[in-house]
Every structure is written in C-alpha cells, then in structure tokens.
Image: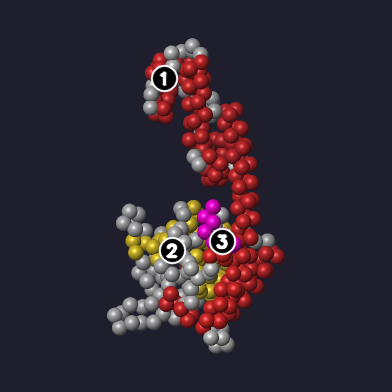
Amino acid sequence: MADTSTQHEDGHKDGHEEGYEDGRTGIKTFPFPVGRSVLGVGMQVGPMGAGRSWHLGEQIERVHRIDYHVVLLFRGGPVRHMIDFDEYEAGDGEILWIRPGQVHRFSSAADYRGTALIMQPGFLPRATVEAAGLYRYDQPPLLRPDPAQLTALRNSVAQLEREYVDTGTLPLSLHTAVLRHTLTAFLLRLAHLAAGAADTAHEQADSTFTRFRDAVEKGFATNHSVSAYADALGYSRRTLVRAVRAATAETPKGFIDKRVVLEAKRLLAHTDMPIGRIGAVVGFPDAANFSKYFTQHTGTTPVTFRAELR
C-alpha cells in the first residue's frame, strides 16, 4: 500500500501513530492509520512485500495490538504469525484474519507476499458488520479456501483494489460508497469461508475431546500424563489442549485431575478401604503423595473429607 501520509509543522506524520501502551501488560495498541489511506477513507488495500508500506513499521516483529481489522491473503510462504499467543503458519492461497483487540506479532516482513486489507471499525454499516460476523472471535483466524473459493476471493479483492486506487472517476462520496459495497461483497465471501472453518474446527474438537474423555475414563487410575494420552491417541499436545478447552473450558491436566479426585472421593465416601489403598487405586502407590495431591485439589485431607461425611 502506498504511503500517502503527510508531514505537519509539529513534526507529526499522519498514518504513523505511535500507539498507546497498556500499563498492565506493556503491550502497545495501534489505531487505524487514517493518514495512510487514499483520500482518507476508512480502509486500505494493496500488495504486501519488501519496499511497500503495508504495515505500521518498527513494531512489526514485536507483540502488539490493533484496533482495526487486518486480512492477509497470501501468495507464497509459508510465514509464521502469532495471534493471541497461538502460532499460525500460512502459505500460498491461505488467509489470516486478525480482528480488533487481538494481540499479534509478525515474523520477518520480507516473507510476506500477497495482498493486505485493513479496515477501520465503523467504516461499514451495522447490518453489514452483523451479516459478515466481523466480531466473531470464536472463529479461527487462519482460513484455507478451496480452489473455487480462492479464485472468487482473489477476484473480489482485486476488484476492491482497483476501486480503491480509482480516485478520478467519481466524487469522494460516491467513491466511498462504491468501496463500501465492494468491500462488503469480499467480506461476505470471507465470512462464509470462516463460518465453514469454524464448524469444521468444532466438529474436530468434539471428536478429539470425545476420544480423550473415553481414554481418561479407561486409564485415569494408572495414567495421569497429558503427553501419554496425546501420544496414544495420535494427537499433538497442542491439539489436545485446544480440543479439551473448547469442550470444557479447562486444560487436559485439569480434566484428568477432576476425574482422579472424583474417584478418590467416591471411594472415601462409599467404602471402608484404607486411605493408602484408595491412593493406590487412583494411581498413587505412596500414601503421602496421594494425601498431598488430594489436599491440593480439594483443600482438605482425605482423612478429614471422610470424617466429615460420617
């Protein structure tokens, strides 16, 4: 995207806003760079690549936050990009959609090729925002269109780019209106793709979690290791973490611990088995280790828990 910023007498340059820092996290937030937009409209679109001013400059490889939408449609790659502390690898024909408020970090800017689109909140009417799901933070940021979808998206963004730089055939009000309509068409296509990706992700998460849950039910008495479950099920640890969090809002280790503690409570409450024996049943041959574990997760010792029920 061309750098159309202007220099003022006080030395400030529109479009190169310094951003502001969150005192709690130390992470800078950068506003939409109005001064970089052609004619000051609330969006920008253009090619990524070396020698082009398509990002905010010096902070690109540091963690930062933005208050506008960024859509990166890649040609070439792959590149690694961190969004909300998860790493995503995007390659040719894939898309990253970063929403306002999300923390992210670029890898080397030289690796980015394709088209970058940014949009200021408020540029599109509310009905379009809702129809396109612009603030659906539950949807995945990495999108992988099929060949037909990719062709349509590339055609759509190319038309948007042509309208963006065509500043001589329409007055500003009509130019802005045409941009809004053309941008809406692109975003509706993108939203359809994102919704489909989200459905697939939920289905995968559900399947992954179900297999994990069943495995824990069978093995919690002898296996308390997240990595061991992941290996046995053929998943990476990260995949397992995401699936369990999506289904239960807790970690795999937390899920295992809850099942172990539940079984221990059942045995303490409903049997007369010695506490050391109960510990062995749920995977703790050493009675002291079991007592420490149970106390850590319940706030009371096994002896006290049993006594309070009787």
Task: Give the farthest residue toward the left.
Answer: 10
* Camera-nearest label, 1 or 3: 3
Q: Secondary structure at mark 2?
A: strand
The answer to whether residue 33 shows anywhere in this view is yes
- In the rendered structure, which disc, 1 or 3, sits on the residue that comes first in sequence? 3
- Between marks 1 and 2, how big is the CA–CA gap? 50 Å
Amino acid type, callout 3: Glu
The answer to whether residue 111 shows anywhere in this view is no
Q: Which mark is residue 305?
A: 1
The percent position of residue 19, horizontal first and vertical second, equals 36, 66
Circle 2 residue: 66
The percent position of residue 284, horizontal first and vertical second, equals 47, 23
The residues colored magenta run: 130-138
- In the rendered structure, which disc, 1 or 2, sits on the residue that comes first in sequence? 2
Reply yes or no: does residue 53 show up in magenta.
no
Q: Nearer the viewer, residue 278 or 258?
A: 258
Residue at image point 55% right, 88% down: 168
Residue at image point 50% right, 73% down: 43
Task: Give the farthest residue toward the top.
Answer: 272
Q: Would residue 46 be found to the left or right of residue 200 on screen? A: left
Q: Which mark is residue 130?
A: 3
- Between marks 1 and 3, how big is the CA–CA gap? 51 Å
Which quadrant holds the C terminus?
top left
Q: Nearer the viewer, residue 266 or 134?
A: 134
Neighbor class of circle 1 (other Cα within 10 Å; few <14, some 14-19, many 20+) is some
Amino acid type, callout 2: Ile
- Between marks 3 and 2, how big is the CA–CA gap? 20 Å
Q: Which mark is residue 276?
A: none
Residue at image point 42% right, 61% down: 65
Q: Secondary structure at mark 1?
A: helix
- In the rendered structure, which disc, 3 or 2, sits on the residue that comes first in sequence? 2
